[in-house]
Image (cartoon, helix red, strand yellow):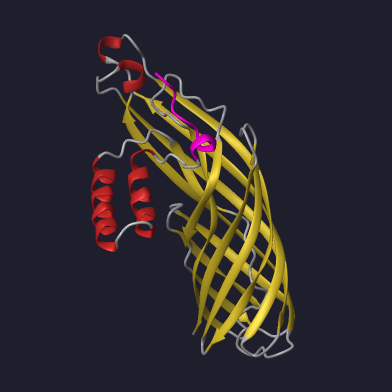
Amino acid sequence: MNPPKTYRQTGRRDYGPWSMVFNGIKNLKHETFSKALFGLGLSLVFGVLLGGCTSVSVTSPNPRIQAPEALGEKGFGARLAGGGSHEFTATQSGGARPPDLNEPDVESDFDFDPSLVYAPIGNLEFGGEVHLFGRGLGAVGKWQILGDGLKSAGAKNFSLAVFGRLGTTGGSNSGDQKSTFGDGGYKWKGSISNNYVEAGSSAGYRVTDIVGFFLGGSWAKYSAKVKIEQDATDGGTDAGGSYSKEYSGSGATLGGGVQLRMNKAYVILNAEHTKIKYDLATSEYSDWTGGLSVVLLF
């Protein structure tokens, strides 16, 4: 029997049973709407019913570029944001005895990160954010060194800022050790966390009162930890096992974007190139990503 083809051979990344869901979404581009929608509905049902992926992974934010303008005056602001993230997979099979924790994998991902910030003064803001797919929380901060903030900036405003974030994301999975013992009900469970700290800087210029552009760079450190516990077999023929490992990583992002003013809201579009490397990982993550943020001022 021929071995399964790899992502490099097929050009398609394998998400296990969830591949049906992603393929259903892609079919919207190639089939009639009614057929594709029906296929997507079936894909969602079977993806939920048959979900049996045995990997243990976590989604964490990439280093990201922030627009340099702070809120501009004392008050609150909300950001509805989505941007580049990466999925760190510690093992492809948590049910293997023992699980292979020495060849982690890193792939491109995306996350939504809504946040709420407070500015005690116009050029300084801090707050918190939620990583919806990464199942985590983070703290964010920005200090605008030069220029006017969002509420007062006009054409020809030059701005310069430093920013940072720190937080944690997590993931978990569980299943049956079929790959080792066959159908027997010997369970396993795995959990993984990834802590990060990030710092960066950006500079921007408003061409008009409405449109501005910015460039910047950001750098991050990551610290991941995985733990997998496997139940013993009946009769004590196998005592089970507990496995854990820690990983460290670092990443850098360069990029820029455009900022559009719409009454009391701002739309920010980013384009970024990121490189991330974890110890023991078989390759370095390198990818272009985009980001979209809507900033609401109160």
Looking at the rendered image, the quarter that the N terminus falls into is top left
Q: In the rendered view, does 138 fall on the left or right side of 24?
A: right
Give 67 or 270, whichever is nearer the viewer: 270
Give 226 or 2, whichever is nearer the viewer: 2
What secondary structure predominates along the stretch shown in magenta? Answer: loop
Q: Is residue 123 visible?
A: no
Give 62 or 4, whichever is nearer the viewer: 4
Residue in the image at 47% along x and 41% along y: 13
Magenta residue check for 3: yes
- List x then y, in percent, for residue 59: 49, 48
- List x then y, in percent, for residue 175: 32, 31
- List x then y, in percent, for residue 234: 25, 14
Rendered position, 195 above or below 131: above
Q: Which residues are magenta?
A: 1-10
- List x then y, in percent, for residue 140: 58, 65
Rendered position, 285 above or below 33: above
Residue in the image at 50% along x and 67% along y: 81
Rendered position, 63 above or below 107: below
Residue in the image at 71% along x and 69% along y: 215
Rendered position, 91 above or below 116: above
